[in-house]
């Protein structure tokens, strides 16, 4: 097996790169883990549901800009070196995260607060866009050819460990302070702690040497003078970038975000499991599943990387529907019973209904149809659609009750109309048996945990070998730039926008599981493209 011990230098490379990247992911994930509290602190000028959506969109902003960070820092990494570039990225990330912990809230400075918050999220996204490619390239260029999957698999654990660390710190502080104090001011502490993590990361990385492969290339004068042009304007390389995106990272990204982020989102927002229980179950599943990043990294050195990644994409696509229906069955059986026994119909003018995908936060969905469907989606109510004549105000039929929606732009007093609609809607869904939250006594925690572990195993299959595979696809002179862009488009856009996309799909169709079609279709597309068009480059000489 290729898992024999590290030399002293190899250990510094792997541990130093991995620890720094763990801390960087910790910084990035804090925001997502605290989205509900941040919504109240920074988007208090809107109603609670809108505030939460805006908070999620600000979270998505960090993902949207990641490919631009990949271009910016990828170019820098191919011009001046791997080590110096990911030193810069971690300083930017740590600084931006620390500042989130000291930002004034909406109540203190008004609209400046959300603008400042989103600006810092954009900085974080840019920095993260340059971090991963640097760490993966740096480690791979130090690794023996037959152990590249093993070495880089430690980098692959960092995103999961960063998420786990953020959940652990939040849970510990939340438990110590109590919910009221944590929501008031204690949420700032995890962000402030990033200053300590930043200091440790910079100290470790300063002790590391430049990649020997890159150093030799620079000494021989073979470095690229225009890595962006070589990577994306020359078809022989641009073709590989496109294949890396569609045949590898797009599928890997949706499987990763479905198994970790969307699973947590589904538990808390759809199944109404309390956040503490959901976070603990996710954290335990990560502890159990994380060693499999290393297992599949080692396996990729022996049987090939592509086989494992494609198998993970296919297994995920085939089993997502039964697995997520299983989560409903074991986490909130009352919701499952209500979905099966209480049919709901939305009657609306089809032209009044929009696809509620809004990653930039610039749209508002104020029609009677959009308000009705968004309310049902947030309450996890399945429904069917019935067409009504043009100009008809949308209505919701729950059992024998009919609740009239409203158009926020046409009523005299939108706040009063919203309050009246919400009161009637809540009474009707409660009467139909849709629970406002999952009953803690009815949650079958062992079975929920088992399903979450399976989802994490899929993540480790697609993610464990991918760094080595991406590194081996591109020449040294443009490797940082070329591998970073498809990775971050895949993970930043295909993966990072998954919760927003899934919510819009659920609201459109009226099925709480309908959002799963997004990762399933993308994963199947990657399976087909990767299987037939990508060549395995295992153990290739990196000095090419």
Image: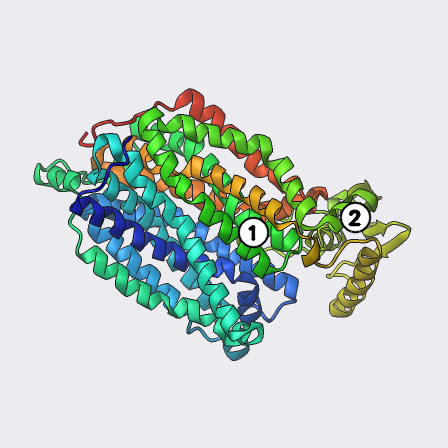
For label 2, the residue is 338
Q: Position of residue 503 (x, y in %)?
A: 62, 48
Q: Position of residue 127 (x, y in %)?
A: 34, 54
Q: Which image quarter is the N terminus in?
A: top left
For label 1, the residue is 264
Relative to 310, say whether 27 is above or below: below
| Residue at 16% across, 46% down | 9
Q: Quick one: which residue is furthest to the bottom in this view?
A: 108
Mark 2: which secondary structure?
helix
Q: Earlier in the sequence, mark 1 or mark 2?
A: 1
Question: Viewed as shown, does residue 249 lie left or right of 503?
Answer: left
| Residue at 22% across, 57% down | 204
Q: Is residue 110 visible?
A: no
Mark 1: which secondary structure?
helix
| The one of 92 and 26 positioned closer to us in this rendering | 26
Q: Position of residue 327 (x, y in %)?
A: 64, 45
| Residue at 65% across, 41% down | 326
Question: Viewed as shown, does residue 176 lie left or right of 347?
Answer: left
Q: Residues within 10 Å of mark 2 (few under 14, many from 20)?
A: some
Q: Are marks 1 and 2 in contact (CB under 8 Å)?
A: no
Q: Position of residue 213 (x, y in %)?
A: 16, 38
């Amino acid at each position: 097996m290729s898992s024999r011990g590290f030399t002293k230098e190899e250990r510094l490379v792997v541990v130093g790169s991995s620890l720094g990247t763990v801390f960087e992911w910790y910084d990035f994930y804090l925001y997502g883990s605290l989205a509900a509290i941040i919504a109240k602190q920074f988007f208090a000028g809107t109603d609670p549901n809108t505030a939460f959506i805006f908070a999620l969109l600000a979270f998505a902003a960090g993902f949207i800009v990641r490919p631009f960070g990949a271009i910016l820092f990828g170019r820098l990494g191919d011009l001046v070196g791997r080590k110096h570039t990911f030193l810069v990225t971690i300083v930017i990330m740590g600084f931006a995260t620390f500042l989130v912990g000291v930002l004034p809230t909406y109540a203190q400075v008004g609209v400046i607060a959300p603008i400042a918050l989103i600006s810092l999220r954009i900085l974080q996204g840019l920095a993260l866009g340059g971090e991963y490619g640097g760490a993966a390239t740096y480690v791979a260029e130090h690794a023996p050819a037959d152990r590249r999957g093993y070495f880089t698999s430690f980098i692959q654990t960092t995103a999961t460990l960063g998420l786990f660390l953020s959940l652990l710190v939040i849970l510990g502080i939340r438990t110590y302070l109590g919910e009221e104090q944590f929501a008031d001011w204690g949420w700032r502490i995890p962000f402030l702690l990033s200053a300590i993590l930043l200091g440790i990361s910079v100290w470790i990385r300063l002790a590391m040497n430049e990649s020997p492969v890159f150093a030799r290339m620079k000494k021989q004068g073979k470095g690229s003078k225009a890595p962006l042009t070589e990577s994306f304007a020359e078809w022989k390389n641009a073709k590989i970038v496109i294949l890396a995106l569609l045949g590898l990272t797009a599928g890997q990204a949706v499987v990763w975000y479905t198994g970790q982020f969307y699973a947590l989102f589904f538990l808390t927002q759809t199944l109404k499991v309390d956040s503490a229980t959901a976070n603990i179950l996710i954290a335990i599943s990560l502890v159990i599943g994380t060693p499999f990043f290393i297992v599949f990294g080692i396996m990729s050195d022996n049987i090939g990387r592509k086989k494992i990644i494609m198998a993970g994409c296919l297994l995920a696509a085939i089993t997502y529907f039964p697995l997520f229906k299983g989560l409903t069955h074991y986490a909130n059986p009352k919701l499952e019973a209500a979905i099966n026994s209480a049919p709901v119909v939305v009657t609306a003018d089809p032209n009044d209904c929009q696809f509620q995908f809004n990653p930039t936060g610039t749209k508002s969905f104020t029609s009677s149809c959009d308000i009705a469907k968004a309310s049902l989606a947030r309450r996890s109510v399945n429904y069917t659609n019935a067409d009504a004549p043009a100009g008809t105000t949308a209505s919701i039929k729950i059992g024998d009750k009919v609740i009239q929606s409203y158009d926020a732009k046409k009523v005299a007093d939108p706040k009063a109309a919203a309050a009246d609609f919400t009161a009637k809607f809540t009474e009707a869904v409660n009467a139909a048996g849709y629970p406002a939250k999952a009953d803690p006594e009815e949650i079958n925690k062992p079975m929920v945990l088992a399903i979450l572990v399976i989802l994490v195993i899929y993540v480790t299959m697609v993610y464990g070998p991918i760094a080595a595979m991406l590194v081996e696809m591109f020449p040294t002179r443009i490797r940082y730039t070329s591998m970073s862009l498809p990775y971050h488009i895949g993970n930043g856009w295909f993966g990072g926008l998954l919760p927003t996309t899934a919510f819009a799909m659920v609201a459109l169709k009226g099925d709480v599981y309908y959002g799963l079609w997004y990762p399933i279709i993308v994963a199947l597309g990657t399976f087909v493209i990767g299987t037939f068009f990508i060549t395995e480059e295992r153990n290739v000489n990196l000095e090419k």
